[in-house]
Image (tube, rainbow, N blue to C red):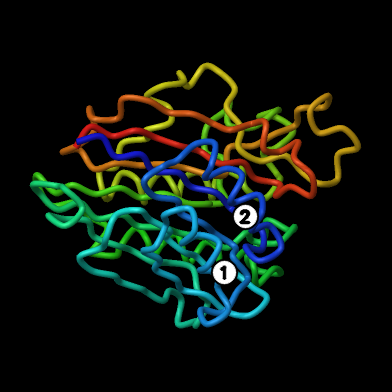
Amino acid sequence: MPLTISTWNINSVRLRIDLVAKFLKATRPDVLCLQETKCPDDAFPLKPLAKLGYVHVATNGQKGYHGVAVVSRLPFEAVDRRSFCDKQDCRHVAVTFGERAGLKDPATLHNFYVPAGGDEPDAAVNPKFAHKLQFLDEMRSAAGLHAAPGARAILVGDLNVAPLEHDVWSHKQMLKVVSHTPIECEKLGAVRAAGQWVDAMRMHVPATEKLYTWWSYRAADWAASDRGRRLDHVWVSPAIGDRVSAMTVSRAARGWTQPSDHVPVTVKLEI
């Protein structure tokens, strides 16, 4: 069956619930993964989502910071939440879809929000950057993120690293900017290699072409300057590496009223 999954760093779900609704009405994915929800679980805006048919929700949130959620039209078989770096930051939630969702074989979906890392790319002087590097190291070694042979898994989210040359507007100018430094790119690559994850977005847009999902609020005219980065990712396990039939980056959402600085990414899987 086809399964459509969208991922979006919404930068406050309560502030932008109308934009979430606008996107869901227009795109109708089966599942929407949100990051940076900035919302405790008991305050998550369930009613507007339920009115649109998204009645299955798994959250891992906290007041004012971080937070992730999976919003779905399909029921879950299981929900898992993990902590990293001995912190209580809410940066991960995973759900498993199975027979109740119409799947013959189960599929697990991980939703991540990796720390941004601050402004100074030096772990010795910037604790936020040190935290980011440790988080990526723990992702690499996490047993549950190493796909067993035949396992059907998807990993999405704001991973806060633009790893490839054309994932940023200027490779040379970004080498010393947090999100594209060599050590971050190396560590994210190690996470992907450890789990044998397939980069679903680059299956549809060659690595030689520019591909962005984020544009800074600081730009006077984000579209004209087009100084973007690909911070949001969709990875799939080898067992379904050839099942991604479509991929869309909803660039227009960056131009909506009071937008997030990220835009949604949607993939269609034939699983």
Element at label 1: loop
Give 87 or 141, whichever is nearer the viewer.
Answer: 87
Element at label 2: loop
120 left or right of 192 in image: right
Q: Which image quadrant for residue 95?
A: bottom left
157 left or right of 128 in image: left
Quarter of the picture holding the N terminus:
top left
Instruction: Tell me the residue at 68%/56% (across/down).
Output: 121
Q: Which image quadrant for residue 96?
A: bottom left
6 left or right of 151 in image: right
* Label at residue 45: 1
Instruction: Give the image location of residue 165, x and y in percent.
Output: 57, 28
Question: Alpha-carbon neighbours of circle 2 within 10 Å: few (<14), some, or many (≥20)?
Answer: many
- Is 235 drawn above or below residue 66 in the view shown? above
Q: Amino acid at mark 1?
A: Pro
Can residue 175 be seen at all in this image of the molecule?
yes
Which comes sooner in the sequence, label 2 or label 1? 2
* Label at residue 10: 2
Instruction: Tell me the residue at 31%/25% (across/down).
Output: 245
